[in-house]
Image (cartoon, coloured by chain):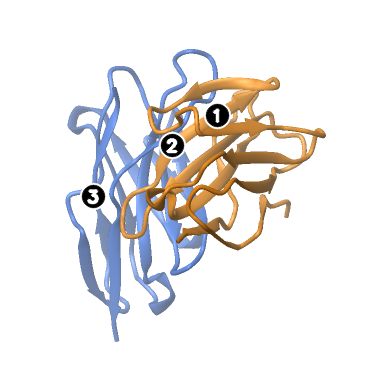
């Protein structure tokens, strides 16, 4: 069964550094998402991506964040200058579209900013 | 804006007993509703979904959920829990009124503990 994959599983970075989190959504899915979950808290929506552009973003997704689908299979989230409060689990998800709106999540990348 | 409330932070159930996890949503139109399960250190697995039609939906692992518009609820049930069901359960709502699959709004989750 196809799955969403994410790399790395754990990323440690120093405050102020740039990080790129990578995702490979399920093939043929049309919608892609990033969510985050701060330890012990609920899952929060960051951004959705469709037809090679951002379709929706939350207030969390400020200018420090960007997304890209560089090659038709990968979907990346870049944080330009990490802050301590960016430490969280980041989940990628994809959705088939075409009246099928369920989202399938990857295993997550745990980002630790020191 | 939509919101999801899961009133129970923790629930403890004996193995073999029945389970009901509560979820209430706030949304103007007919929502798309989901239940996800998260085991420790794992991602989110889709248990079941409701888009339209029959208000009682079946999911994986023996779970079911019932959509009640009058109560704005989408409670998750299982007739007999197994120790492997111990996990965090999240209810989520989606807004597709704009014709696209926007981001989900999640509840805070219910931590399910199974007693032997």
Q: Position of residue B10 (x, y in %)?
A: 21, 64
Q: As rendered, which of B40 and A76 lies closer to the eye?
A: A76
When the figure is inspected, residue B107 is found, relative to residue B26, above or below; the finding is below
Q: Residues within 10 Å of mark 2 (few under 14, many from 20)?
A: many
Q: Residue at x 75, y 41 (%)?
A: A74
The hue used for chain B is blue
Mark 3 or 2: the one toward you: 2
Mark 1 or 3: the one toward you: 1
CA gap between label 1 and label 2 equals 8 Å
Q: Chain of mark 2?
A: A
Asked whether the residues under the numbered discs 3 and 2 touch, taking CB atoms below 8 Å apart as contact, a structural biologist would say no
User: Which residue corresponds to mark 1?
Assistant: A48
Q: As rendered, which of B56 and B92 lies closer to the eye?
A: B92
When the figure is inspected, residue B71 is found, relative to residue A106, above or below; the finding is above
Secondary element under disc 2, as helix, strand or loop, is strand
User: From the image, which quarter does the N terminus of chain A lie in?
Assistant: bottom right
Asked whether the residues under the numbered discs 1 and 2 touch, taking CB atoms below 8 Å apart as contact, a structural biologist would say yes
State left or right for residue A35 relative to residue B15: right
User: From the image, which quarter does the C terminus of chain A lie in?
Assistant: bottom left
Q: As rendered, which of A40 and B2 lies closer to the eye?
A: A40
Badge 3 and badge 2 both on one subunit: no
Q: Residue at x 51, y 57 (%)?
A: A14
Q: Position of residue A46 (x, y in %)?
A: 46, 35
Q: Residue at x 34, y 70 (%)?
A: B80
User: Which residue corresponds to mark 3?
Assistant: B22
Report the disc number at residue A45. Answer: 2
């Amino acid at each position: 069964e196809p799955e969403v994959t994410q790399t790395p599983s754990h990323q440690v970075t120093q405050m102020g550094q740039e990080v790129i989190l990578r995702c490979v959504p399920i093939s043929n899915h049309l919608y892609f998402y990033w969510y985050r979950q701060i330890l012990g808290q609920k899952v929060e929506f960051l951004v959705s991506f469709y037809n090679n552009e951002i379709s929706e973003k939350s207030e969390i997704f400020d200018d420090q964040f960007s997304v890209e689908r560089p090659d038709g299979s990968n979907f990346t989230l870049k944080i330009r200058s990490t802050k301590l409060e960016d430490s969280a689990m980041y989940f990628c998800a994809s959705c088939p579209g075409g009246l099928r709106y369920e989202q399938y999540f990857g295993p997550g990348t745990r980002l630790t900013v020191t | 804006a939509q919101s999801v409330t899961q009133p129970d932070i923790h629930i403890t159930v004996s193995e073999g007993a029945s389970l009901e996890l509560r979820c209430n949503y706030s949304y103007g139109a007919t929502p798309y509703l989901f239940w996800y399960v998260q085991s420790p250190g794992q991602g989110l697995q889709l248990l079941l979904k409701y888009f339209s039609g029959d208000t009682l939906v079946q999911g994986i692992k023996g779970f079911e959920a019932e959509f009640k518009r009058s109560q704005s609820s989408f409670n998750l049930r299982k007739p007999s829990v197994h120790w492997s069901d111990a996990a965090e359960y999240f209810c989520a709502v989606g807004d597709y009124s704009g014709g696209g699959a926007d981001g989900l709004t999640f509840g805070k989750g219910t931590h399910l503990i199974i007693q032997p």
